[in-house]
Amino acid sequence: MIATNYAIPDFVIFATSTILILVGALGVITLKNPVHAALSLIMTLFGVAVAFVAQSADFLAAAQIIVYAGAIVVLFLFVIMFLGVGYGSKSDVEPLVGQRGFAIAGVVITIGGLIALMASSHWVTGATSVTGPLAKGQGNVKQLGTAVFTTYLYAFEATSLLLVIAVVGAVLLARRERATTREATDETSDEEVGS
Amino acid sequence: MNVPAAWYLVVAALLFGIGAFGLLTRRSALIMFMCLELMLNAANLTFVTFSRTMSDIAGQASVFFVMVVAAAEVTVGLGIVVAVFRRRSSTSVDDLTELKG
């Protein structure tokens, strides 16, 4: 484990992950080129993975890298290059007047209220777990596996169904039909509805 | 010991705010999906922080399921983006004004 009893390394890890997270996130929302934005997203995801490791969520850190940075961002990059989306799609134009100002105001109010609410309620309240406390300092992959395959077994099975539905839906959406065939079927269906 | 949980919560809140701002202001549907990922990651970071503080594995299990749902959401979302791009030759959400009265 990386986390030790010393405060200084923990703080360094925290600062590193914070810098990675915030710089990457700002890159996502400011960079014009979608490819650069996707690479900034990888930076943020990596920072979150560092934060996971620092909080002894080892399996989730690995899954974060493998699933997010390895699969989801690659999917993003694949779609960007498949579509050939170029630079800045009119991101400077403001179709709604004052949209950016309202967005800033709304986000600042929300985040400020959230932080103020947490600070006024001593950040973390509630009773710690008594049934299965986390193993200290030796990782908890085994505990997570036990929880997922016993307590959350039905949810786990439901996610498999969800993924199958998502894959079938994505194939159906992205499938390229022949225009003539589609028009023919549309006409027949219209006639059936009409008659 | 570890740094206080409050710091991680503040970082997660900031990350959520940045993602929300990007979602509200960017035009490209692809970038908006990336901002959605930022917001989901902020929620995940909060889950893990509370899991550590409360010493309860349920938070980490929740993150596991959030990751699965995020993967499914991105798959379907990008499929929709590809389908829209085939019709409109654009991923800008401002061009989708067919229902405008």
Image (tube, coloured by chain):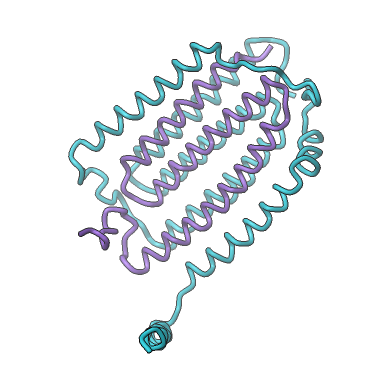
Chain colours: A cyan, B purple
Q: Position of residue A93 (x, y in %)?
A: 20, 45
Quarter in which the C terminus of chain A is drawn: bottom left
Marker count (numbered): 0
Q: Position of residue B98 (x, y in %)?
A: 26, 63
Q: Position of residue A108 (x, y in %)?
A: 35, 24
Q: Where is B82 relative to A179, above or below? A: above
Q: Along the line of sight, which residue is nearer the eye, A15 or A136?
A: A136
Residue A150 placement, left or right of B10 = right
Q: Along the line of sight, which residue is nearer the eye, A5 or A148?
A: A148
Q: Which residue is situated farthest in the left direction here?
A: A97
* Residue at left offset 68%, top offset 39%: A62
* Residue at left offset 33%, top offset 40%: B24
Q: Where is A22 relative to A60, above or below? A: above
* Residue at left offset 50%, top offset 29%: A20
- Quarter occupied by residue B18: top left
- Quarter occupied by residue B22: top left
Q: Position of residue A145 (x, y in %)?
A: 78, 40
* Residue at left offset 41%, top offset 87%: A192
Residue B75 placement, left or right of A90 = right
Quarter in which the N terminus of chain A is drawn: top right
Q: Where is A191 relative to A117, above or below? A: below
Q: Where is A97 relative to B12, above or below? A: below
Q: Along the line of sight, which residue is nearer the eye, A187 or A84?
A: A187
